[in-house]
Structure formats: C-alpha cells, structure tokens
Amino acid sequence: MEMAKHVPQRYPSNEDSVGIEIVGAVVAGRGQNPAEQGAYEPVNAQQNASLRWLISELTSTFGIPMTEIFRHPVVSRKNPTEAESALW
C-alpha cells in the first residue's frame, strides 16, 4: 500500500532511499530475541563524526534536504533504540 503513494506521502523504501548502518552491541535484552527487543549501546564519537561527514556529503552531492533524513525506527518497524544517540 505504501508504494502506491507518492513521495512524500509515503515512507521511503529500499527502492528510493539510502540506509546508513551504525553498528552497536545489544546491551540489554528483554525476551527471546535481544537483537530485536534489547537496547543498543550509544553511538560513539567516531561513529557520529563519520555519520556527520557522510550526511554532509550526501546532502551536498545529491541535494537531499535534511527534512528527508530519518532515524530507522521512524520509517520502519525497528527497535526504537537504534541510532537513538546518533547526531547529525
């Protein structure tokens, strides 16, 4: 149903978006699958510096407005602690 909508009325998909993965360990789990239900460690200073550089490059090269940059849990059913401490 989402793909039938036009941007920006729909969430981005893998067909029209770029995902940036920031890897962090699961530090607390609740339930059977801690990777989905746990809390992730905070993004560290080096990861945040790299993220700021990459987003700066993407926005300047492709003209992507900052209003089109989202944390993963905002646009997908993911753990809300993913990228919670990411700064750009």
Image (cartoon, helix red, strand yellow):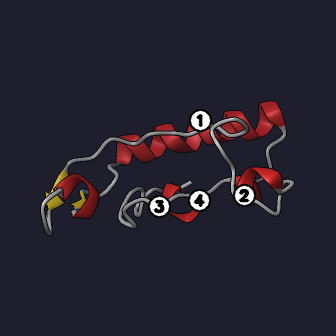
| Percent x, y of residue 69 | 67, 53
Question: Tags 2 and 3 in contact by the CB under 8 Å rule?
Answer: no
Residue 1, label in figure? 2
Q: What element carries label 3?
A: loop
Q: Mark 3 points at which residue?
A: 77
Crowd tier of the residue under label 4, counting other residues whose Cα lies within 10 Å: few below 14, some 14–19, many 20 or above? few
Question: Tags 1 and 3 in contact by the CB under 8 Å rule?
Answer: no
Residue depicted at 53% across the width and 58% down the height? 76
| Percent x, y of residue 7 | 84, 54
Residue 75, label in figure? 4
Is label 2 or label 3 in front?
Answer: 2
Look at the image and tell me in which quarter the N terminus lies.
bottom right
Mark 2 and mark 1: span between their CA atoms? 31 Å
Q: Earlier in the sequence, mark 2 or mark 1?
A: 2
Q: Classify residue 55 as left or right of residue 7.
A: left
Q: Classify residue 71 as left or right of residue 33.
A: right
The amino acid type found where label 4 is placed reads Val
Residue 54, label in figure? 1
13 and 83: which is toward the camera:
13
Q: Earlier in the sequence, mark 1 or mark 3?
A: 1
Mark 4 and mark 2: span between their CA atoms? 15 Å
Mark 2 and mark 3: span between their CA atoms? 16 Å
The amino acid type found where label 3 is placed reads Arg
The amino acid type found where label 2 is placed reads Met
Mark 4 and mark 1: span between their CA atoms? 20 Å
| Percent x, y of residue 73 | 49, 62
Question: Tags 2 and 1 in contact by the CB under 8 Å rule?
Answer: no
